[in-house]
Amino acid sequence: MNPWTNRPDARDTTPTMQILRARPATTTAGVLLSPDLTGAYTHYWRGRTRICENPNCDPCNAHHKPRWYGYAALWSPNSNAVALLELTPACLPQIDAHIQRHNTLRLAQIRLRRANNKPNSRLILQIDLHPYPSGNAPPNPDVHATLERLWECTIVHPALEISRLALNNGSDR
Ligand SMILES: [Zn+2]
């Protein structure tokens, strides 16, 4: 590898975003920027989240079940902050209904809370019938690249690659 370059690799210039998980007794609200979820099966293994590398996956080989999480960029119009919102399969009926109605998740106005005060209780997602009215929302950040950077993985999972293509082909669909 040639160490002399005018700019760092794209991976190293992707702005980091915090992953936002719904906390008990708190409602998370904002506007989604991504046209769809970017999802992956992951393990929480040896102190950090890592992507499932099945069939050559250490956690799977240790009978640790992978779990699916979906991510979308969430924008707060008040603070102008953008974070990566973590969603679970429990949120998919509302997500899919909104995509069917509007052909995109982008500009969906959401409220997310937990079913009770336990930190891992079921997520309850509400999406407003009408998307955020303004066109001045920031562009969708590269969710896939951000996750790769956060999870320190370079492996391109086929499912992730498909959703990245879908994002690139229809960033404002
Ligand atoms: Zn695995």
Image (cartoon, helix red, strand yellow):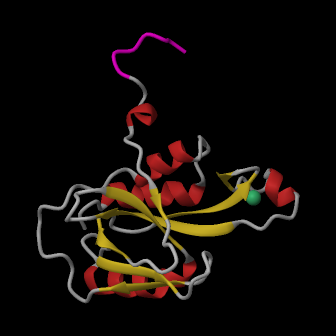
Q: Examine the rendered structure and indicate whether residue 10 appears above or below residue 148.
A: above
Query: For ligand 1, which image quadrant applies?
Result: bottom right
* Left or right relative to 159: residue 30: left
Residue 62, picture quadrant: bottom right
* Left or right relative to 65: residue 78: left
Q: Examine the rendered structure and indicate whether residue 98 appears above or below residue 88.
A: below
Rendering coords of residue 130 (x, y %): 20, 85
At a point 49% along the width and 82% down the height, the residue shown is: 91
Image quadrant occupied by the N terminus: top right
Rendering coords of residue 149 (x, y %): 51, 42
**Residue 4 falls within the magenta-colored stretch:** yes
> What range is drawn magenta here?
1-7
Viewer-closest of 9 and 120: 120
Give the main secondary structure of the magenta stretch.
Answer: loop
Farthest right residue in view: 62
* Left or right relative to 158: residue 134: left
Q: Examine the rendered structure and indicate whether residue 101 appears above or below residue 61.
A: below
Viewer-closest of 45 and 24: 24
Viewer-closest of 126 and 145: 126
Residue 99, picture quadrant: bottom left
At a point 59% along the width and 47% down the height, the residue shown is: 151
Image quadrant occupied by the C terminus: bottom left
